[in-house]
Amino acid sequence: MKVLNLLLTLLFITFAAVQYNDPDPWGWAALYLYLAAACGMAAFGKSNRWMLLLGLAVSGIWMLTLLPSFIHWISMGMPNIVETMKATQPHIELTREFLGLLLCTLVFGWQLLRLRKR
């Protein structure tokens, strides 16, 4: 698990680094770096339950605010959201953000489950 957590740490640091051209980079960079720190701490057996719960709450609540947009995208027939990197329509950006938050929420949840099993 140490290697997986180190890979996740590097992945989320990379995600934070590429937020420079996003319309709202600071919140995303902060969330990704927070998750990278959580994964890095887990790699060395230093997980903190409260840190993980806070991250899970923030990412989960943020994700729920985008749920209506995600459902709208599904009702549209799930048009392509990866055709270009530039989000030309609102549903593209909002769906990508929802999926990014889903990934963060799943990783925070996984880290909490791992911590509970120890």
Image (tube, rainbow, N blue to C red):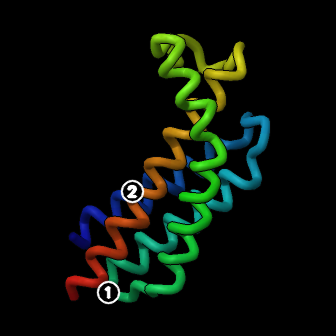
For residue 69, side relative to residue 108 (left or right) = right
Distance between the alpha carbons at the discs numbered 2 and 1:
19 Å
Could you say whether the residue bearing mark 2 is in a helix, strand or loop?
helix
* Residue 28 image position (x, y, % from top left): 66, 51
Residue 15 vs 60, above or below: the answer is above
Residue 93: quarter of image: top right
Q: Tag 2: residue type?
A: Leu
Q: Residue at x 55, y 31 (%)?
A: 70
Q: Is residue 1 left or right of residue 80?
A: left
The residue beneath circle 1 is: 45
- In this rendered view, identify the residue nearer to me: 11 or 72: 72
Image location of residue 49, percent across then percent down: 44, 85
Q: Kindly state the secondary structure of the residue where label 1 is placed.
A: loop
Please tell me which residue is depicted at 58% across the width and 23% down the height of the picture.
Answer: 72
What type is the residue that disc 1 sits on? Answer: Gly
- Point out residue 52 in the picture as x, y percentages from the top left corner: 48, 76
Mark nearest the camera among 2 and 1 is 2
Above or below 7: residue 95: above
Quadrant assignment, res 118: bottom left
User: Which quarter of the figure is the N terminus placed in?
Assistant: bottom left
| Mark 2 neighbour class, 10 Å CA radius: few under 14, some 14 to 19, many 20 or more | some
Query: What residue do we see at 42% from left, 73% from top?
Result: 40
Rendered location of residue 32, percent (x, y) = 57, 57
Viewer-closest of 108 and 33: 108
The dot on residue 106 is 2
Which label is found at residue 80? none
Q: How many marks?
A: 2
Few, some or many C-alpha atoms within 10 Å of disc 1 (few <14, some 14-19, many ≥20)? few
Residue displayed at 56% across by 40% down = 98
